[in-house]
């Protein structure tokens, strides 16, 4: 089955190929099928934004389409930047510096945050199905690591990380790794996108069994 990933970013297509590995799917991106139309993400929630993209590209392509939307919610910033994460500042480095400046006086135990990811599957006939994934953590005081993107260098997913290796969330956060210091394989077990993709896997696997 062909599955369109609603992105022009080949890195995101590769990430989904890893997250959905083992399923009988041929994953393609927008560039692979010649679609260069950009969808305005003017929804008020992650699901609304993902659904706008999924519905549009499913109708244009005639393919089952997967679209996602994600953001970082910081408790000390009243949930900002949230769905506006990509527009918080002009680029990733500027976004990180702006956030660290806003949080310069926030104590370590109040730097809680979470990555949220919504994934929507849309069929050409207009049907949709949505799932959510979350990764809880803390905001570090300085960026570390080069393996991630966006806010990854300042996000410490320490509860999930320490549970994975046998520790507890009570361990000092400075001993944990930022999302950008994790290997891709490890990140793909604990990230918000990974948690949402696990739910999508179950949906697609059920479809495959039904159609077999």
Image (cartoon, helix red, strand yellow):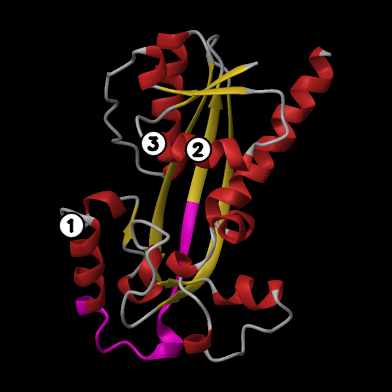
Question: What are the residue bounds of the magenta stretch?
Answer: 101-116
Q: Are marks 3 and 1 in contact (CB under 8 Å)?
A: no
Figure quadrant of the N terminus: top right
Residue 68 visible in the snapshot:
no
> Mark 3 packing: few (<14 Cα in 10 Å), some, or many (20+)?
many
108 falls in the magenta region: yes
Per the model, the C-alpha gap separating discs 1 and 2 is 26 Å
**Disc 2 designates what residue?**
14
The residue positioned 45% from the left and 20% from the top of the image is 55
Mark 3 to mark 2 CA distance (whole Å): 22 Å
Give 136 or 161, whichever is nearer the viewer.
161
Say which residue label 1 marks: 89
Asked if the residue at tag 2 contacts the one at tag 1, i.e. Cβ–Cβ closer than 8 Å, the answer is no
Mark 3 = which residue? 49
Residue at image coords 65%, 23%: 25
Name the element at disc 3: helix
Instruction: Give the number of the mark in front: 3 or 1.
Output: 1
Q: What crowding class fits label 1: few (fewer than 14 Cα within 10 Å), some (14-19), or many (20 or more)?
A: some
Q: Is residue 31 above or below residue 187?
A: above
In this rendering, position of residue 179 left or right of residue 23: left
Of labels 3 and 1, earlier in sequence is 3
């Amino acid at each position: 089955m062909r599955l369109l990933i609603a992105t022009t970013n080949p890195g995101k297509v590769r990430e989904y190929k890893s997250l959905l590995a083992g399923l009988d799917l041929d994953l393609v991106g927008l560039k692979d099928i010649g679609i260069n139309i950009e969808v305005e993400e003017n929804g008020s929630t992650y699901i609304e934004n993902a659904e706008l993209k999924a519905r549009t590209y499913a109708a244009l392509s005639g393919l089952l389409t997967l679209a996602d939307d994600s953001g970082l919610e910081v408790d000390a910033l009243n949930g900002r930047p949230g769905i506006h994460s990509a527009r918080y500042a002009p680029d990733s480095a500027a976004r990180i510096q702006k956030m660290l400046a806003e949080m310069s006086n926030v104590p370590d135990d109040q730097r809680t945050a979470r990555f949220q990811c919504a994934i929507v599957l849309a069929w050409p006939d207009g049907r949709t199905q949505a799932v959510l994934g979350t990764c809880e953590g803390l905001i570090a005081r300085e960026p570390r690591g080069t393996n991630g993107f966006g806010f990854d260098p300042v996000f410490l997913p320490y509860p999930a990380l320490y549970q994975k290796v046998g520790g507890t969330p009570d361990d000092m956060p400075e001993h944990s790794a930022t999302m950008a210091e994790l290997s891709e394989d490890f990140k793909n077990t604990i990230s918000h996108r990974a948690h949402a993709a696990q739910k999508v896997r179950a949906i697609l696997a059920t479809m495959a069994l039904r159609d077999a």
